[in-house]
Image (cartoon, rainbow, N blue to C red):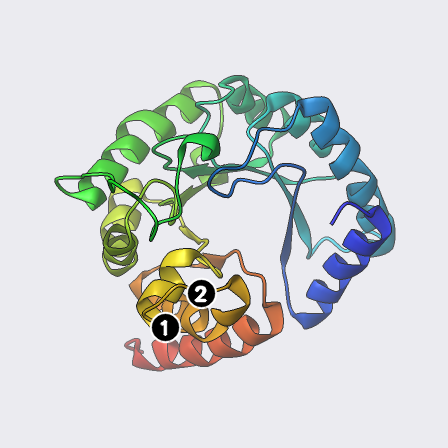
């Protein structure tokens, strides 16, 4: 959606449905996607950001995340009103992004990724799937031993960091399900909240429909796995269908809360 007015209206509708954070990006991270130059990303993102900040009229309860791997784009977006940097490369594309987060005080999402989008495949379409001896151990090692230390060495406060296991990025269908089921292991060792970003991804359709599927067919499977991820420890959810997720996750959270000892 490249029309700033339409994009801003869609984002405002998501707030009405219950979104607490809006994630805006000018470059696709789906498998096979071509990279977009920073200048073009800025031209796409900033008009939407400015419209949103004007429409939100100072509502501090709604944060804006910029989805980019470029420090140049991140700095421009934060200057225009973004609060969080969502970097799917974990700083590997542009290590300067850590300095931008540190200097601006922005939140930072750090994600595990095996390869850039242009070299990746959808989880259920690998000719030769990635091979991990233990996918959870590999993701944990990169987050704990590489990404978190690099970010904090650059001056990013630990409290500003969110971790993302990178569901759908360089993992087979089985790897993605394993990461969801064992998320508590990652959260415990990293000591940071986890973002769940599985909405409408190909592996969701593969396990819920057991066939090739279109993104529009994957809502039921997405809701089921999002609830499973909530019970496994995820606390932030990047989704397409905001209203449906708000209802489903609210119901699941009520069950989690009721099970806690008083």
Q: Is residue 67 above or below residue 199?
A: above
Q: Is residue 106 above or below residue 216?
A: above
Q: Residues within 10 Å of mark 2 (few under 14, many from 20)?
A: some
Q: CA distance from mark 1 to mark 2?
A: 8 Å
Q: In the picture, residue 74 is in which quadrant?
A: top right
Residue 229 visible, this angle: no
Residue at image mark 2: 213
Q: Which residue is drawn at the image coordinates 30% and 75% (left, top)?
A: 260
Q: Which residue is drawn at the image coordinates 80% and 50% (left, top)?
A: 52
Q: Is residue 95 above or below residue 163?
A: above
**157 or 86, which lies in front?**
86
**236 or 73, which lies in front?**
73
Residue at image mark 1: 209
Q: Which residue is drawn at the image coordinates 32% and 70% (left, top)?
A: 210
Q: In the picture, residue 102 is in which quadrant?
A: top right
Across and down, in percent, residue 198 comes to 43, 57
């Amino acid at each position: 959606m490249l029309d700033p007015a339409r994009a801003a209206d869609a984002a405002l509708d998501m707030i009405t449905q219950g979104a607490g954070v809006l994630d805006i990006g000018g470059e696709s991270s789906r498998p096979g996607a071509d990279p977009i130059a920073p200048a073009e990303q800025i031209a796409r993102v900033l008009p939407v950001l400015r419209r949103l900040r004007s429409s939100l009229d100072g509502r501090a309860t709604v944060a804006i995340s910029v989805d980019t791997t470029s420090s140049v784009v991140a700095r421009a977006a934060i200057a225009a009103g973004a609060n969080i940097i969502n970097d799917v490369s974990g700083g590997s594309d542009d290590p300067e992004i850590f300095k931008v987060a540190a200097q601006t005080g922005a939140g930072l999402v750090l994600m595990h990724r095996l390869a850039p989008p242009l070299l990746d495949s959808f989880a259920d379409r690998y000719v030769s799937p990635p091979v991990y001896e233990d996918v959870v151990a590999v993701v944990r090692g990169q987050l704990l031993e590489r990404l978190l230390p690099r970010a904090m060495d650059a001056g990013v406060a630990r409290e500003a960091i969110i971790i993302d296991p990178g569901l759908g990025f360089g993992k087979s269908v089985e790897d993605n399900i394993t990461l969801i089921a064992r998320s508590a292991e990652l959260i415990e060792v990293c000591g940071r909240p986890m973002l769940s970003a599985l909405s409408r991804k190909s592996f969701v359709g593969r396990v819920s429909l057991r066939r090739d599927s279109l993104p529009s067919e994957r809502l039921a499977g997405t809701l089921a796995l999002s609830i499973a991820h909530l019970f496994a420890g995820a606390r932030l959810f990047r989704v397409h269908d905001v209203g449906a997720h708000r209802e489903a996750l609210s119901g699941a959270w009520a069950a989690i809360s009721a099970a806690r000892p008083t």
